[in-house]
Amino acid sequence: MAKCTSFHEEVASSRGICEVFWTCYKASASGALYAVSISHNFLVSKSRLISKLHNIADHCKILCHLSLANSYYSLVGIVYKTWVTPVKDSATLHNTRTGLGGFADRVGALAYALTPLTVALGSRESILSLATGIPYQSFNFLHRWSGRIIFFQGVLHTFGWCLIEARLYVPQPTVWKKFIKQLYMIWGVIALVFITFLYVFSLRRVIRLTGYEFFKKTHYIVAMLYIGACWGHWSQLACWMIASIALWGIDRGVRYLRTILIHYGYANGSTGELFTLLILSCSMTNYIFQVEDFILRNLPCIISMMKMEVLCVSNLIINMTHGP
C-alpha cells in the first residue's frame, strides 16, 4: 500500500509538473504569436503610411503647379496704377480707376476655366483615369482643392467688383443700386451662394455632421445649379459651362450603361458571370500528445517545437496577408 501510495503521489506530482509546463508553453507561444502579429501589423501599416505619404506628396506637387499657374495668370499683364476720371454731367465728382477691375475679371474667368477640370477630376468614370490609368481616388484630392480654388477666386472676383462699384465709382449710392439690380449681377450673387454652399458642405467636419448621403445628393444638385447660375451671370464664357455639363453627362451615362450591363449579365460583350468568388480553403490539424510522457521525456525538444510553431504561424500570417 505504501508503494502504491508513493506511486500515485509521483504520478500526481508529474501531472502537476506537466500542467505547469503545458501552461507555460501555451502562454509563451501565445505571447510569441502576439508579438509576431504586432510586428507584422506595424510593418504593414508603416509601408501603407509611406505609400500614402508619397501619393500626398505627388498630389501636393500638382496642386502647387496649378496654384502657381493660377496666381501667375491672375496677376501678369495688369497695369498697377490709379487714374482719376471725371463723371459725366458732373463738374465736381470723379471716379477712381485702378487695375483691380482687370484683376477681378481675370480671376473670374479662371474660375470658369477651372470648372470643367474640377468636374472631370470628380467623375468616377473619369476620362482622365482612362487616359492616364490613374485611379479615381487619386484625382479626388485634386477635385476638392480645385473646387476650393474656384471658391476663393469667386470670392475675390465678387469682392473686387463690389469694392469698385460701391466705393470707387460715384455718386453713391446711385451707382451701387443701379449696379446690383442688373440681371447678370443677380445671377452672380446666386452663383456665389451656390459655390459657398458647395465649399462649406464639402468640409470633412460638416460631412460628419450632416451625413455622406446628404453631401452626395446636394453636391450633385447644387453643382448643376452653380453651373447654370454661372451661365446666366456671364454668357460670353458659356463654353466652359457647356464643357462641364458634357463631362458630367458622360459620367452619368457611363454609370447607367454599366448598371444596365451588370443587371442583364453582360461582360466584355458576352453573357456570363461578372463576378468570381474565390474561396480559399484551409484546414487545421490538432496534434494530441500524451502530455505527461511527452513533456517529462522530451523536455529539451519542447523549446525547439515552440520556436518552430512561432516560425510556422508567422509564415502563415505573412502568406495570408501577401497572398495572390
Image (cartoon, rainbow, N blue to C red):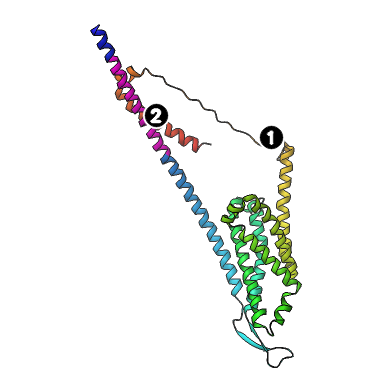
**Residue 112 showing in the rendered view:** no
In the rendered view, does 10 fall on the left or right side of 236?
left
Give the position of the N terminus as an image quadrant.
top left
Q: As shown in the figure, which amino acid type bears the numbered disc 2?
A: Glu
**Residue 198 showing in the rendered view:** yes
Question: Measuring 73% from the left and 47% from the top, which residue is drawn there?
Answer: 256
Mark number, residue 122: none
Mark 2, secondary structure of its residue: helix
Judging by the rendered image, the residue that carries numbered circle 2 is 309
Principal SS element in the magenta part? helix
Dot 2, how many residues are within 10 Å of its Cα: few (below 14), some (14-19), or many (20+)? some
Question: Measuring 57% from the left and 66% from the top, which residue is drawn there?
Answer: 67
Choose top left, top right, bottom left or bottom right for residue 168.
bottom right
Give the residue at the far left of this rendering: 2
Question: Measuring 62% from the left and 65% from the top, which residue is drawn there?
Answer: 151
Choose top left, top right, bottom left or bottom right for residue 308.
top left
Image coordinates for residue 101, horizontal then vertical, percent: 65, 78
Image coordinates for residue 239, horizontal then vertical, percent: 73, 65
Image coordinates for residue 319, horizontal then vertical, percent: 48, 35
Answer above or below: position of 313 versus 79: above
Mark number, residue 273: 1
Q: Is residue 278 magenta?
A: no
Which residue range is magenta in the image? 10-37
Q: CA distance from mark 1 to mark 2?
A: 41 Å
Nearest the viewer among 288 and 183 is: 183
Mark 1, secondary structure of its residue: loop
In the rendered view, does 187 fall on the left or right side of 33?
right
Q: As shown in the figure, which amino acid type bears the numbered disc 1?
A: Glu
Image coordinates for residue 209, horizontal then vertical, percent: 59, 53
